[in-house]
Amino acid sequence: MMKIFKTQRTLKEHLSSIKGKFEVGFAPTMGSLHEGHLSLIRESKKRCDIVVCSIFVNPTQFNTVSDFKNYPKNSSEDIELLKSTGCDILFLPNDVNEVYQNEKKVSLELGSIVNVLEGEHRPGHFDGVMRVVKLLFDIVQPDKAFFGLKDFQQFLVIQKMAKVLNMKIEVLGCDIVREKNGLAMSSRNKRLSNIELKNALVLQKALNHCKNNFRKMDLQALQAECFRILQKESNPEYFEICDAESLSPITEISETKNIRAFTAASIGEIRLIDNMEIL
Ligand code: PAF
């Protein structure tokens, strides 16, 4: 039976009664769950004794009021999905204050990984993500925490935050889950029309083009070609080929082994991101 807690006080009480006896895995989410989220719950179940999920649409990480307001919400469907996936505990706070009460703000210096890509294009976004994830980590105090690699940069930022703050939490990334046609699963896909859903495949198309042509041509030219592919069906913000650890752009093909391509593009009103391992 999945237990649902709406206040941090009752959740903490429950968790302290099992602390030390079980290994706790945690998957924070903003709800509107899809297979990508459920894969985090499954991985957490495989690796831990107790699985905690949170559903909280965090206002501090949105750049526009309309994106926050229109973020899809469906908690009764989410609850059923979590139950059927074997989640043990759901933290479902009723309001923002329930999470942010008692926040002690810390300023963190995480270096360039927060300022590039999404950090550059969505100013303040990672500040909001770090604020809420730190609060949730402090409430749940998990042994392991699971994040989807569609938000690869978010995963790196949180991993670094946990390290810098000396939190004893292993931050793990789980593979991107895609639809059969290759579209990376995202709660925002629910807001796309049928035509837009087809157009959204262009992100995957550009990333595949990058992977298939890597080493065959000059990197800047390849990047520009991928950007042009995106322009045919979307309004692209960036297409960048980066070192997968530092996220610094790769300008020439060298000995770097760990390379990933990252993109953000809007399909109509909806901004999507995706990324792919290149090497
Ligand atoms: O990836 C998300 O859904 C959110 O950024 C997270 C990690 C739940 C924080 O609000």
Image (cartoon, rainbow, N blue to C red):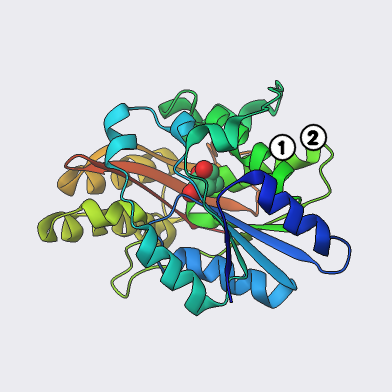
Label 2 sits on what residue type?
Val
Q: Quadrant of residue 34?
A: bottom left
Q: How many marks?
A: 2
Q: Is residue 192 above or below residue 234?
A: below
Q: Residue at x 42, y 72 (%)?
A: 80
Q: Residue at x 80, y 35 (%)?
A: 165
Give the percent coordinates (x, y) of residue 216. Answer: 43, 56
Residue position marked by numbered label 2 in the rendering: 164
Give the percent coordinates (x, y) of residue 72. Answer: 31, 50
The Cα atoms of the two marked residues, 2 and 1, are separated by 5 Å
Give the percent coordinates (x, y) of residue 74. Answer: 33, 57
Whether residue 115 appears in this view of the structure is yes
Q: Residue at x 57, y 51 (%)?
A: 259
How many residues crowd mark 1 within 10 Å: few (<14), some (14–19), many (20+)?
some
Q: Mark 2 CB in 8 Å range of ligand 1?
A: no
Give the percent coordinates (x, y) of residue 185. Answer: 37, 62
Q: Are marks 2 and 1 in contact (CB under 8 Å)?
A: yes
Label 1 sits on what residue type?
Met
Q: Residue at x 19, y 39 (%)?
A: 269
145 sits left or right of 32 in the view: right
Residue position marked by numbered label 1 in the rendering: 161
Between residue 64 and residue 56, name the one nearer to us.
56
